[in-house]
Image (cartoon, coloured by chain):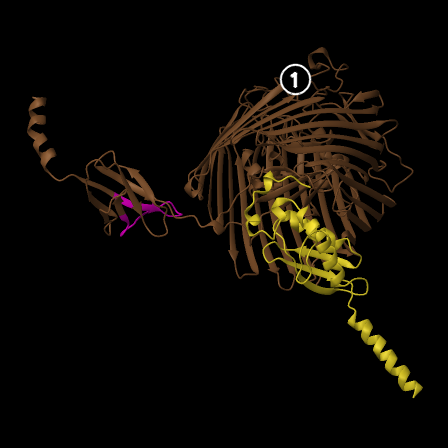
Amino acid sequence: MNKIFLFLTLTFITLTINAQQKNKKAVIKVEGNCSMCKSRIEKASIKLKGVKYALWSPITKELSLIIDESKCDTLKIKKAITGVGHDTYNLEAKKEVYNALPACCKYRDPNSIHMNHKKVKKP
Amino acid sequence: MKYFFIFFLSPILIFSQLNITGTVLEKNNKGEEILISNANIYWLNKNKGTTSDYLGNFTLPYIKNQKKIIVSYIGYKTDTITVNRLNLGKIWLHPEIKLEEVIIKKKINPLQKSLFKVQNIVTVDSREMLKAACCNLSESFETNPSIDVNISDAISGAKQIQMLGLNSPYLLFTQENTPSIRGASQIYGLSFIPGSWIESIQITKGAGSILNGYESISGQINTELVKPLTDKKFFLNLYANNYKRYEFNTRYNKVLSEKLATGIYIHSNLRNGKIDNNSDSFLDIPLANQINLMNRWQYVNTEKGWVSYFTTQFLSDSKQTGQIQYNKNTDKFTKNAWGSEVKTKRLDISSKLGYVFPELPYQSFGLQLSYSNHNQNSYYGFNQYDIIQKSFYTNAIFNSIIGSTQHKFKTGINFTHDTFNEIVNTETFIRNDNNFGVFFEYTYDNLERLSFVAGLRVDNHNRLSTFITPRLHLRYSLWDKASLRTSIGRGKRGANIFSENQQLFASSRIIDITTNKRNKNLFYGLKPEIAWNYGIGFVQKLYLWNRSLEFSIDLYRTQFKDQVIIDWENPRNISFYNLDGKSSANSLQVDLNYEIVQNIDLRFTYKNYNVNLDYKSGYLEKPLQPRNRFFLNLNYETIKKNEGKQWRMDFTIDSRGTQRIPNTNTNPQLYQLDNFSKPYSIINFQLTKVFSNKLELYIGGENITNLTQKKPIVSNSNPFGPYFDSTLLYAPILGSIYYTGLRFNIK
């Protein structure tokens, strides 16, 4: 009985190890407009431990990630991104943080995407 | 009589129905006129109107007191036209602009200094290459202030380049990141790469990266050639100048599938003008011809992540120079006349293989293999010089990250094998060099202000022993659009004293090598050269009155620990010996680029060099090196019209300050030169007319003020005497050059 239990535990451990991929690909929908948004979103994600690669496309609004699952998960990344003012699929950024974004990055206003970015000063 | 006619005609004008006529059409992308039928034409604020017929013509009855008609058609911008005559002629409608299709093109300067790259890199693109009249890599730097172009001597006409006050052997030349011009090809090799094959050039100031070797000291110059998959389908360039120089360049690319393409590139040139404008009985420019062929294959598979190139190049070049009456069949190795011939045959085979891991976009692997065989046979008067160099080079690089893309690294191994076989008059020098190197380069980017590249390589060389080459480049963003860069690095190399200083053979100077006979593992008995290079640079980009301005200052210092001194100070000798004392090269460069008026770009550069070294005869300034140099380039381009119609104008002034001339005091009075040369300026211009995207014509002038060195050759009347010397050259030999040419291409 003990032996079977041990065997099962071992199998379970191996399975969890296998399930935690070192190079896990993930795609998260992140709201944003421009290249300033892009660098803000990518910076917030890449600076987290376990995030190896982050690329956000302003056209598809998708953030492609490669993460080490043993160190990080997508929830942490989503929190970090909402923390700098960008809404993700099911997490919203706080109003104060969002309001502090430069005018061209205020993606909740549908007209902001057409803004002239040159006239906007960097924060 | 006149009044009679008016009287007679006026009733017709009054009583007949007045009609407004016109034709509606559009211009398509190719600039062809296309008639628009069924367009609506009607009076403003009235219901009366008509439509155009199948030829685009319309007739609209005139209505009193109405001045404007409206022309409209679906998909086109509605136009309002003031009726001021009966026949309105051609009315062009413009397609309605769809918002999502607007392409905003930013004007990119053909000479780019990067703000974000860690290394101090200037990128020169193919448009800049068009500005230089002609035709090969050595001439393509004439509009570029980072690099100095000099003529090495009054005989060979070879153009030599310098950076940071040091000659080209201290630069590392790479072709698509594979070392290319080194050893035997050092002097003439730059003229073996036709300008029209070049896609872009990257000039790195300072020590540069460790990936391609340990030899670079003052900088690296990488050329990217055109690639069969992205190049134009067909390209043709013809050139001719007033000294009977003709050039022919053509490229043909065939795309075999989405993934595979091949290209055949042909260059040939001919110089058959016997020019002696300064009447010194010597040709001002060699008679020459060259055939240069290249075939490239490119394979790209983006889904699987494979990229591969395979390139073969064959070159045959021959030059004849010397006295104008010299006949190579009867006068060779005689005292009938002084003459020289340089014949080169070269074969280059290289291949590259790259793999990007499809699942991991930051991870890749690259392999480079190249083989070259360089065979030069030459004589200069009674001096004979032959060199055969066979080289094999391979480099394997692995790119990946540590933790995240903030920490990238490149690591790999590299092996180089060179065989040199030289005949210098009666002496033979045979040398086999093998080098095995391991390198690691780490790149850090904190994504805010700081980034750096730190590289280290360890090499084992049969003559240079085992040694370490460290390089560090750092960039710090001070404020918006401003970067501060520093770099430090070490370089080491064995000097190929004959091939790098071939001009010495075109003189009666006696070769004197102070050798260290005890150690056979040396280069011609001379110790290898070791130098440290330090640099600091600042660049600021900004908008001044809505036009872009770029300002930069670079300060570099190269300090030699060991150097092979090339001593010209005794006019009867050329001596090579190891440095005993100090040797350093300091350089300051200030650049200012500004678009002064719409489409007129100004480039201004000031450079100051301070290159001094310990000769046996004392601590002296490096000879034939201007201390100060000013450079001014103005470029004007009209706005591109349909089909790319355009005018381009380019104007350059290059001023060089005084240069120290090697000591000639021990020569007889007649053969003595001043201690310093006079400053001078050279003016070049070029005018290009683009007729369409396919065809352009250009004309231009080089050195239009006809500035020349009056007596470029010492003792020209007695070339077999002891004072003959063509190496003391500080100004052009050839006067004004006027040229014309055309470029034709099919996309």
Relative to B539, say whether A64 is above or below: below
Type of the residue with mark 1: Pro
What color does chain A have in the rendering?
yellow
Q: Which residue was labeled with disc 1? A: B679
Magenta stretch containing residue B546, yes or no?
Answer: no
Which chain's residue wears label 1?
Answer: B
Image position of B278 with respect to B86: above or below: above
Residue drawn at 28 percent across, 45 percent down:
B24
**Closest to the observer: B616 or B699?**
B699
Horizontal and vertical percent position of residue B522: 85, 40
Magenta segment, which residues?
A: B23-40
Palette colour of chain B:
brown
Q: Residue at x 79, y 53 (%)?
A: B411
Side (left or right) of B534 relative to B98? right
Look at the image and say whether residue B36 sits in the magenta stretch: yes
Q: Is residue B350 above or below residue B583?
A: below
